[in-house]
Amino acid sequence: MKKFLKVIGVLVCVLLLSSNIAYADAPLVVLDAGHGGSDSGAISLDGQYLEKVWNLQTTKSCKETLEKYGVEVIMTREDDIFLSLAERKQIANSADVSISIHYNATANHKGAYGLVIGGKVEGSTKLAHSIKDELLKVRDNVQVWENNSYYAMTNLKVPAVIVETAFIDNPNDNKYADTLEEREEIGKRIAYGILNYLDIDTTEVIEPTKETDKSTEDNSKKKEVEVKEDKGKISIADKIRNLILGKRSSSDEKIQYIKDLILK
């Protein structure tokens, strides 16, 4: 076991040193798309929408926006797989900030507001209000709960919030998110809330204009494809996530050893 842990430790150090972006220089955010796999989460009244799908779509949009501003992002899941709350928390503790994204539901289907739940770690309340302020730009009535005792938030060592963006089982509320475009916009708003909390200037990224020269646009698309196909370009955040999860091994000793190395 000791030999195995030493190998893992060396591997983590090599990955950190070989990264093009110094780990210490960039904020690291964990984004948790709630539910997944056998756990569908909440379901709309007509059965058309599953929370796990909406969660992932919104989280991916949030990740894309954060990365435009140089933030390193770890997603607890990038496809339709099941992860336990314990696994999600293990990943969350490897970051500077942890965000869990959900869509809410109630037994009587009467809920009609957004909800940002702040954890107990210092900074969580400020983070929750920062995200709330951004969500209010795309929907009305967003509430903040502070210092909750949800299991998903216990034993976390970093500022963390759970974002319940809308009630999926209430037609008057899920109207804010019943199109992919709206769910992606919500993801962007959550990202801007995180960026504001991290004091990152969001005016530095210049979006391409519609008048962009076609040849330039074609070259940009070609470069995007090349980066996606180049397996050597995997980010340090993805490497850390893969190491923590491994082949779905749940060895507490291995995971804690890797986390300790990352946090040093």
Image (cartoon, rainbow, N blue to C red):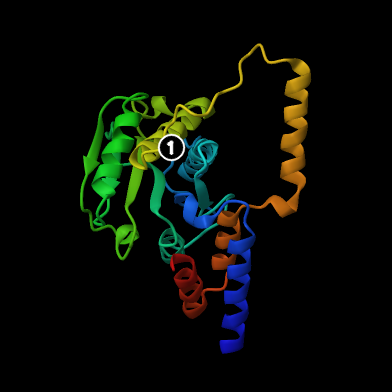
Residue at the extreme left? 146
Let me know if residue 171 appears in the view: yes
**Quadrant of the snapshot with the C terminus:** bottom left
Q: Residue at x 63, y 71 (%)?
A: 11
Q: Residue 52: x, y in percent? A: 49, 46
Q: Residue 249 appears in which quarter of the rendering?
A: bottom right
Which residue is at the front of the view, 225 or 24?
24
Q: Residue 216 appears in which quarter of the rendering?
A: top right
Q: Residue 240: x, y in percent? A: 56, 62
Q: Residue at x 61, y 21 (%)?
A: 208
Q: Is residue 259 left or right of residue 97?
A: right
Residue at the extreme top? 211
Which residue is at the front of the view, 144 or 222?
222
Helix or strand or loop: what does disc 1 sit on? helix
Q: Which residue is mark 1?
A: 191
Q: Residue at x 33, y 62 (%)?
A: 157
